[in-house]
Amino acid sequence: MLVLFNKPYGVLSQFTSDGGRWQTLAAYINIPDVYAAGRLDADSEGLLLLTDNGALQAAIAGPQSRVSKTYWAQVEGVADTSSMAQLKRGVTLNDGPAKAVNASLLDITEPWPRDPPIRVRKAIPDSWIELSIEEGRNRQVRRMTAAVGLPTLRLIRVAVGPWRVEGLAPGQLRTLSDDEAFAALRRKSRRQAAFL
């Protein structure tokens, strides 16, 4: 089984508490024996995949996996085509180089309200960008946007491989069978191979 969950802000990507201030998945998901395929920081929102199938988990988030993850980032400052090109060329982080598979400007308003809302500074504009990566290092997207002078204020994962968050409000989920999930991965792989 594959669970697609729109993780709200302030929720850990695990079922047990770390004793801190964050909620856990247990507040939203009552499906036994599923575990996150990858992680999403508590202060990030959006699509989190969970599964009870080890092979599916490895295909999505294992060390050999090349499943892309797409984010919408609300950043402090005015993003432009030059900063998007820099993200695609690559930036140097403290744990090595990182580059976006794709980076583009977004002309959107807030996809859904966040509780609590981001801090707004009237004198400093903000903008939205879309960024896709194939890695998943700790806080990678936030560190990449900061490296080009655009600190992330809000981060929403909108897609993992062939699956998107559209149609799921924060805190909602839907499930797919293993067969449906593997079929979607195969279709996505074939489409990517056609462009190589």
Image (spheres, rainbow, N blue to C red):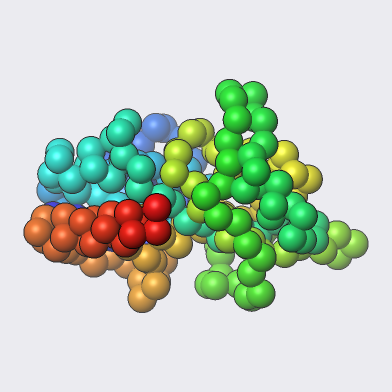
Instruction: Residue 124: give x, y in percent of width and height.
Output: 85, 59
The quarter of the displayed image where residue 1 is located: bottom left
How many marks are shown on the rendered structure? Answer: 0
Residue at image point 59% right, 25% down: 96
Front residue of this view, candidates 104 and 73: 104
Q: Is residue 4 above or below residue 18?
A: below
Q: Seen in the image, is 80 located left or right of residue 124?
A: left
Residue at image point 69% right, 52% down: 85
Instruction: Residue 84: give x, y in percent of width and height.
Output: 69, 55
Residue at image point 40% right, 53% down: 196
Front residue of this view, candidates 129 and 101: 101
Front residue of this view, candidates 81 and 40: 81
The residue sitting at the right extreme is 123
Q: Seen in the image, is 74 located left or right of residue 123?
A: left
Residue at image point 23% right, 62% down: 187
Instruction: Residue 108: give x, y in percent of width and height.
Output: 63, 75
Specify whether residue 181 is in view. Answer: no
Q: Seen in the image, is 131 located left or right of residue 77?
A: left
Front residue of this view, candidates 13 and 69: 69
Specify whether residue 94 is in view. Answer: yes
